[in-house]
Image (spheres, rainbow, N blue to C red):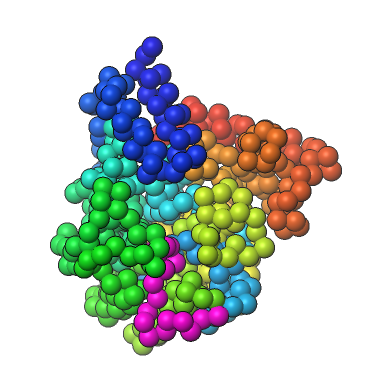
């Protein structure tokens, strides 16, 4: 048996075990097996290889970036963690009140059919920053873990990436080369070892955490310096999923976390110089565990989860007020969205599914964009778009060309945002957790899930969007449309089998 076939067998076993008994427990089981049969994993697979050819291209490309034009806008991307499509009052929530975010929507554009590139956070964050689907960036195997965590060690032993590959290009790197002041605040979740942190991917300044707020250890960083050390007591599988059962010891006070991020964001705006700026604010909430400000605890009709979301709304209000106070409104584009659909306590609205699913509730997320004098107030769009589109859109607004050595899956949606064009996408594709092949596709009317046991009979599921929350299979009513989507999805799956990284 070849080494590749042996590794493939372990991959399949781990995937099935993870689905049945959970990621950490599966990790323990598989590590035991690997420890007894070390010949299955070679030492050279302990860290993912770097594509030297494309790393060299990246360096050359960044050196060729020209100065942004004077008309280039400032950029703020506010990225929530696990905020569901139905969690905001502007999207129909009746118990959670989000007046500040609603005001941003009233002054700009609300999109009803916007998607994350994945139903979990690491691949979605990579897609946002690079414009590429998860397999391109080696983020298609669930989420990254701390390198010293049991699962982080297992990922590297399996030959899976546990950090964003160095050869990937982020919009922060491009905008920084174009003259922008670039800052990040909040959750990274794209690698924790030195050389793979926010400062290494184009962010001049960073204040935040490396992983989700349920992971351990959760240190707070100011660039490379730990400013709040996690001194809690934990085991090799330590985590904190439930705020009712916190880990003992000192660490970040998560009731203050949203305000800490907000204060840093306002300070970034106050201290900006003469250059245009790009601020990426990646909140840790409303991911579990759920902690809200003590000043507003138990005040939302949405319970503890509602308290957390309303805290995020107040944070957004403070940032928007700072823009006004500093006379930065007119030429700043503000983008508000989420990394994936709602987790258990969140709301997918009228959509089927939640975080982790490729049903609509797992990947369709809120998207609100404000850009005075460019986007008409009170705009609403039902055009489909995805967070992969933010990379090419920001590059275009900054006067830059796209890299030519790799597939950029996103499209420039500047004209869509300003109401001058329809979606540039004929289709968008959905990627299941732990799968390198797309599992669903949609067009402007219909959606098709690939043959899967998730729908009960091991066959594809064809539904009409906007009518029944993907509940009813209606291939018999639209056989030609179903056949067309099945062919397109099959062709895209073949593409990813042949060239998963998308190198040109």
How many marks on residues? 0
Going 30% across and 53% down the picture, which residue do you hit? 238
- 314 to 111, vertically: above or below: below
Which range of residues does the magenta coloring cover?
282-301
Q: Percent from the top left, x then y, of residue 78?
A: 42, 68
238 or 290, which lies in front? 238
68 magenta-colored:
no
Residue at left 62%, top 77%?
Answer: 94
Q: Residue furthest bottom?
A: 325
Question: Can residue 252 be seen in this snapshot?
Answer: yes
Determine the residue located farthest toward the top in the rendered image: 1
Q: Is residue 297 magenta?
A: yes
| In the rendered image, the vertical position of residue 498 relative to residue 229, given as above or below | above
Residue 285 in view here = no
Image spot of residue 104 (x, y percent): 51, 78
Which residue is depicted at the point 76% across and 48% down? 472
Q: Position of residue 45 (x, y in %)?
A: 27, 29
Q: Is residue 160 left or right of residue 350?
A: left
Pinpoint residue 299: horizontal percent, then vertical percent.
Answer: 48, 84
Q: Nearer the viewer, residue 281 or 288?
A: 288
Residue drawn at 46 percent across, 29 percent down: 12
**465 sits left or right of 274 in the view:** right
The majority secondary structure of the magenta stretch comes to loop
The furthest residue to the left? 225
Classify residue 407 as left or right of residue 272.
Answer: right
Image quadrant for the N terminus? top left
In the picture, the quarter occupied by the C terminus is top left
Apparent side of residue 311 relative to residue 359 in the rendered image (left or right): left
């Amino acid at each position: 048996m070849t080494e590749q076939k042996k590794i493939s067998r372990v991959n399949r076993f781990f995937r099935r075990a993870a689905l049945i008994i959970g990621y950490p427990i599966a990790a323990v089981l598989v590590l035991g097996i690997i420890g007894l049969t070390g010949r299955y994993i070679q030492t050279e697979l302990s860290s993912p290889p770097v594509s030297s050819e494309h790393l060299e291209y990246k360096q050359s490309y960044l050196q060729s970036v020209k100065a942004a034009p004077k008309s280039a806008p400032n950029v703020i991307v506010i990225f929530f963690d696990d905020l569901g499509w139905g969690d905001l009052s502007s999207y129909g929530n009746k118990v959670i009140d989000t007046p500040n975010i609603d005001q941003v929507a009233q002054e700009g554009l609300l999109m009803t059919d916007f998607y994350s590139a994945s139903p979990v956070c690491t691949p979605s964050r990579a897609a946002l920053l690079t414009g590429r689907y998860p397999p391109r960036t080696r983020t298609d195997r669930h989420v990254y873990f701390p390198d010293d965590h049991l699962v982080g060690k297992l990922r590297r032993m399996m030959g899976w990436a546990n950090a964003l590959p160095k050869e990937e290009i982020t919009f922060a790197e491009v905008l920084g080369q174009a003259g922008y002041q670039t800052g990040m605040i909040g959750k990274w979740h794209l690698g924790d070892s030195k050389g793979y942190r926010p400062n290494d991917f184009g962010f001049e300044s960073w204040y935040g955490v490396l992983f989700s707020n349920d992971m351990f250890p959760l240190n707070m960083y100011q660039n490379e310096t730990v400013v709040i050390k996690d001194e809690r007591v934990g085991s090799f599988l330590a985590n904190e999923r439930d705020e009712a059962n916190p880990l003992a010891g000192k660490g970040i006070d998560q009731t203050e976390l949203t305000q800490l991020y907000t204060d840093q964001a306002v300070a970034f705006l106050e201290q900006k110089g003469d250059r245009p700026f790009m601020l990426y604010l990646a909140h840790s909430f409303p991911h579990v565990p759920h902690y809200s400000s003590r000043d507003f605890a138990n005040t939302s009709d949405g319970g503890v989860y509602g308290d957390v979301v309303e805290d995020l709304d107040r944070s957004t209000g403070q940032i928007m007020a700072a823009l006004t106070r500093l006379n930065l409104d007119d030429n700043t584009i503000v983008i508000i969205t989420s990394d994936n659909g709602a987790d258990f306590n969140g709301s997918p609205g009228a959509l089927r599914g939640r975080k982790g699913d490729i049903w609509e509730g797992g990947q369709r997320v809120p998207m609100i964009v404000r850009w005075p004098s460019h986007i008409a107030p009170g705009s609403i769009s039902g055009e489909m778009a995805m967070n992969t589109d933010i990379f090419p859109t920001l590059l275009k607004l900054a006067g830059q060309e796209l890299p030519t050595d790799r597939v950029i899956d996103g499209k420039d949606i500047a004209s869509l945002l300003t109401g001058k064009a329809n979606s540039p996408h004929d289709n968008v594709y959905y990627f299941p957790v732990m799968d390198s092949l797309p599992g669903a596709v949609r067009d402007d009317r219909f959606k098709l899930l690939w043959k899967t046991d998730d729908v009960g009979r091991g066959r594809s599921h064809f539904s009409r969007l906007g009518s029944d929350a993907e509940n009813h299979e209606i291939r018999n009513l639209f056989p030609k449309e179903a056949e067309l989507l099945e062919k397109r999805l099959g062709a895209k799956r073949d593409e990813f089998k042949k060239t998963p990284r998308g190198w040109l």
